Image (spheres, grey):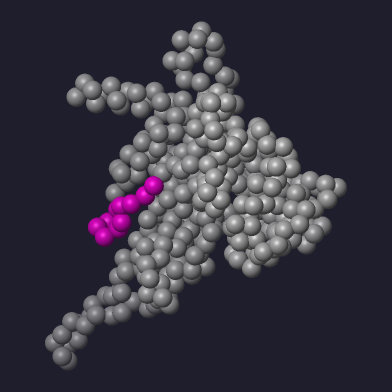
Amino acid sequence: MAAYNRQVDQHAADFAVGEAPAVEWFVNHILRASRYPQGFPAMWQVAYRPENRDVVVEFELPGQQVVPAVREYRYIKARDSIDPVARPITEIKQRYARLIACIALRTLHEIFRATPAGVIEAVVFNGRVNTTDRATGKQVRPHLISVEGERAAFDELVLADVDPAACLAYLNALVSPNPFDMEAVEPFIAFDLKRFRFVDATDELADLDSRPNLLKLSPTEFEHVVKDLFVAMGAEAWRTVPSKDGGVDAVATSKNLFFGGVCLIQAKRWTKLVGLDAVHALTGVMTDHNATTGVLVTTAWFSRTSEQFAQRNRITLINGAELKYLIKEHLGIDVIPGTNPPRRVRASDNRQTGKPGPAAP
């Protein structure tokens, strides 16, 4: 018991300074304590991004069968029998849509209520369902809802009085237009890639590592790596855009869903956060070139506001950790991605060094 208590105390100390494993451990306990009716799946995954102070929850939604197909039972005197009265399919669809909306809002509420603003400023909820594709008969897991809730906006809600669908629209959620028919949406943040974080002390160990270091490449060499990556991912054409066109490095075309037509690509070999200005500038160049989509690739990381803006403007963001993963997957090359996102100093570290901790943002 003493060892367990020490472990809990350590988790609490790590959680207070935003250590990812501790925050994920705590959020998992929050979700485990949330009770749902029998027959609801109790499955989820959690990822925490310290640089953005947000937590991503991949949540397993129940299937349509949780909405009873029978509305009521009636006694038929002439036959002396009790007959079921079917629930109209329209009502089943409405109830199911309302159900997944309520689950999303409930999850955001539970996490915000149990955590401090200094650790979690936003929650991204991705709800998906495990079902069978009626066209192929194969098992599929489409996302039916994705919402990125900011604590400041969520705290202003009076949840007891909101209409769930209207509330999600207010929060700019992505909701399937036909959740009963499993029509999928693209989530705000792809969960799997967020599991690949920067490794601590990358800079200190870089000179002892035989892997290519993206930060030590020249701008031209880095652009070639990005070009090779996108060709491997399905780009059918590639050409360099002159530097006068807003710093966009390439135009790629493809018929697949990732590119969706003409795609402008910008590669930033940076060691600092890529803010909203850089993402905003790409939209102007996309307009000039009548591009369908844009991609911003960096060796660094993005702010949450950049991610939100990109989502609204058909721009895909690829940070250093994701770039490392994609290069390994599609080119078979293991690289050192870039610079670690900033992390807060632990109180114990301050005591050991005698240096004051960073001021609260």
What residue sits 15% from the left and 85% below the top?
A: 81
Magenta residues, start to end: 36-45
What residue sits 59% from the left and 64% below the top?
A: 257
> Can you name the residue that lies furthest to the left here?
80
Quarter of the figure that contains the C terminus? top right
Q: Magenta part mainly helix, strand or loop?
A: loop
- Provide residue 256's location: percent of width, then percent of height: 60, 66
> Can you name the residue that lies furthest to the top here?
354
* Residue 155 visible in the snapshot: no
What residue sits 28% from the left and 80% below the top?
A: 85
Q: Determine whether, in the image, residue 146 is placed left or right of residue 234.
A: left
- Provide residue 133's location: percent of width, then percent of height: 41, 72
**Residue 38 in magenta stretch:** yes
* Total number of numbered discs in the rendering: 0
> Can you name the residue that lies furthest to the bottom here?
78
* Residue 289 visible in the snapshot: yes
Picture layout, residue 84 above or below residue 233: below
- Provide residue 35's location: percent of width, then percent of height: 29, 49
Picture layout, residue 288 above or below residue 361: below
Quarter of the figure that contains the N terminus? top left
What residue sits 68% from the left and 42% below the top?
A: 222
Q: Nearer the viewer, residue 185 or 244?
A: 244
**Residue 230 in magenta stretch:** no
Q: Nearer the viewer, residue 13 or 163?
A: 13
Q: Determine whether, in the image, residue 122 is placed left or right of residue 270.
A: left
Picture layout, residue 353 above or below residue 214: above
Q: Quadrant of residue 339?
A: top right
Q: Nearer the viewer, residue 215 or 155?
A: 215
Q: Quadrant of residue 7?
A: top left
